[in-house]
Image: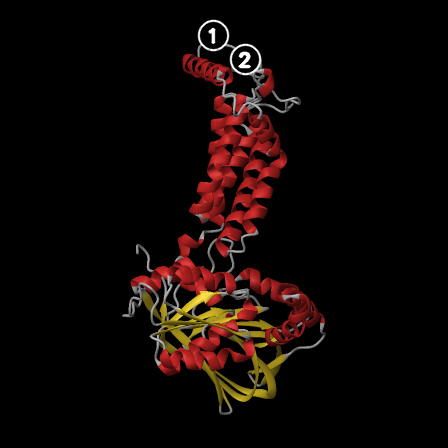
Amino acid sequence: MSPDVDPTVLRTGARPLRDRLLALDSRLFAFAAARRRPVSEPVLPRLGRSADHGVLWFATAAAMAASRTPRSRRAAARGLASLALASLTVNTLGKRSVRRTRPVPDPVRVVRQLRRRPITTSFPSGHAASAAAFATGVALESPGWGAAVAPVAWSVALSRVRTGVHVPSDVLAGAALGAGAAFAVRGLVPTRAQIVPPARPRAQVPALPDGEGLVMVANTASGTAERVRALHDGLPLAEIVECEPSDVRAELEKAAARATVLGVCGGDGTVNAAAETALRHGVPLAVLPGGTLNHFAYDLGVEGARDLTRAVQQGEAVRVDAGRFTSDGHEGVFVNGCSLGVYPELVRERERWSGRIGGWPAGVLGALRVLRADRHPLEAEFGGRSRPLWLLFVGNGTYHRMGLTPGRRTDLADGLFDVRVVHGGRRPALRLLAAAVAGPLTRSPAHAAVQVGRLRLTGVAPGTPFAYDGEVTEVGGDVTVEKLPEALTVYRPLPGG
């Protein structure tokens, strides 16, 4: 183990470059310690203490998440993940590899000195690493939030020198390590900006600079008021129709009859109704995410009012595939996916409880109730033998895994269905979890996947629950699922616009 090094004391020997760097470090430390800024003198110690154990950054992440926008929540989560990795690296490798003592705080004014000095080694600065990791992680997901957090992170890092507990090289090394941790997290879990779907095939649509001609139907049960107001600020001539869930389909019909562009704000079920209406009337669709999941809007690259406003103002749109199912004369359209088996039962349980306890708790409760049931919700015939299935899922478009993240669609006009099967057997919860973790390309005995352009199921028991885009109906006999290639025109911001 090498002896501790005091960077404030010059050492002579056969390492002139190191000695010059240590001398520069000492001069910079003395310069920073001697400078007087009356406004910041009492603030810096408090700021440094607030960042102890990451408390400042956890509070910042909570405030960001409270804004209730998807990008803010992702930025907060990414910032905390980056902070965790940076802290782990500093404490397990950094401080044990270079056992540097803390600088002597004599040049620092008493008002700035910490009452309780850290007892750990000095290199690298853990506070600087955490600050840089959190700020960089946030900025990689949301540049706006990153710009707001960066001055605070810089002040925390600077305070470690100004209060006399680190020399500048400690802080610089910690900041570099923290930024590296944020980029490492991005390598494992890519940001949305890295997986923007391709802007094809492009569609010719009218540009509506003030929103005139856009009729936006908003489902009030999806908590859409705030998002609709934000859209109206950017498109003041757009017509906004807010309605209860029972009136959504009727209002969509009336809106499509008079609109140049049919808009919708709500969850997956509301978007499904709007897509079906837009297909029948031949009008382009503008989707503003307003529900809990919003898979279709997010996979398009529309995360909020700002994205949709830009697309509508500039006339940016693409054509995407839709799916259609038919069974005994009954048919429907979907833009996300459809399924047989355990998921339709989960949706029914969720809908049963969501009005009493809220959407997310109802989803958790529904999953627990369904997975605890000791029965197979679906059977299929293979090679003349009837076998139990827990789930058959048909996704509209191929789902791809990005790093460690769950699968996402990067191309909504690939002409394919992503079909996944989870076979029945013991321990259904474990099987479904394994299917979710393993992704769409697994070939294990418990689950399998294939990409096809058309699917036909025979011998489905009458009254079998069938879920599509969060809605549930009943099917029986023969069930056919087919593609409607590039059938739907949807506004979305194009890269570089």
Residue type for callout 2:
Pro
Residue situated in front as seen by the camera: 175 or 382: 175
Q: Quadrant for residue 322, please give it.
A: bottom left
Residue situated in front as seen by the camera: 484 or 277: 277
Residue situated in front as seen by the camera: 127 or 324: 127
CA–CA distance in space, label 1 to label 2? 23 Å
Q: What element carries label 2?
A: loop
Residue name at image x 57 percent, y 52 percent: 66
Residue name at image x 62 percent, y 38 percent: 55
Residue type for callout 1:
Thr
Residue where numbered disc 1 is placed: 12
Q: Can residue 12 be seen in this view?
A: yes
Residue name at image x 68 percent, y 66 percent: 357
When the figure is inspected, residue 269 is found, relative to residue 31, above or below; the finding is: below
Label 1, residues with CA under 10 Å away: few <14, some 14-19, many ≥20: few
Q: Is residue 483 visible?
A: no
Q: How many marks?
A: 2
The location of residue 427, given as percent across then percent down, is 69, 67
Query: Residue 156 has which mark?
Result: none
Residue where numbered disc 2 is placed: 107
Please identify the residue farthest to the left as the structure is shown. 204
- Label 1 or label 2, whichever comes before in sequence order: 1
Which of the image's four quarters has the C terminus?
bottom left
